Amino acid sequence: MLFADVYKVLGAPADADRALTKFDTLKLGIVSRETGPQPPQSFSDGAVVITRPCKARIDNAAHKDHEQFESVWDDLVYNFE
């Protein structure tokens, strides 16, 4: 689905309600961070299976703490034009 189709798919109130209900099930697995060191620490502790940290923090954990982190750059959400 393209982002432009979102309004077509969620045009009716029942469709929006269905989307919000689905989000309620997903948000139970979302962990928000409060500080910069939390993403690599949460990953090391097994609290999360995927994270979006600052690359410098991952590099530091990999080199200094010998963590087995791997950066994946495929399918990035961000698009800088």
Image (tube, grey):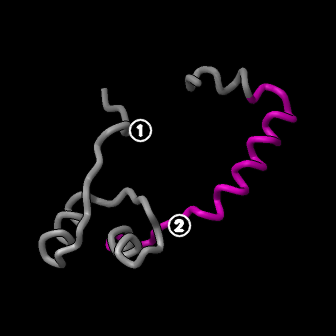
- Label 1 sits on a secondary structure element that is loop
Label number found at residue 31: 2
Asked whether, in this view, residue 44 is left or right of residue 19, the answer is left
Magenta stretch: includes residue 32: yes
Check the image and name the residue furthest to the right.
14
Instruction: Give how far across and how far down residue 63 sits, in percent.
Output: 12, 71
> Residue 53 occupies which quadrant of the picture?
bottom left
Mark 1, residue position: 77
Q: Residue at x 84, y 28 (%)?
A: 12
| Magenta span of residues | 10-37
Magenta stretch: includes residue 30: yes
Q: Residue at x 87, y 35 (%)?
A: 14
Badge 2, how many Cα within 10 Å: few under 14, some, many 20+? few
Asked whether, in this view, residue 60 is left or right of residue 8, the answer is left
Front position in the image: 9 or 47: 47
Q: Residue at x 78, y 25 (%)?
A: 11
Label number found at residue 64: none
Q: Residues under labels 1 and 2: Cα distance?
A: 18 Å
Given the image, on which type of amino acid does mark 1 rest? Val
> Residue 76 occupies which quadrant of the picture?
top left
Q: For the C terminus, give its image quadrant.
A: top left
Instruction: Give how far across and how far down residue 72 sits, in percent.
Output: 29, 48
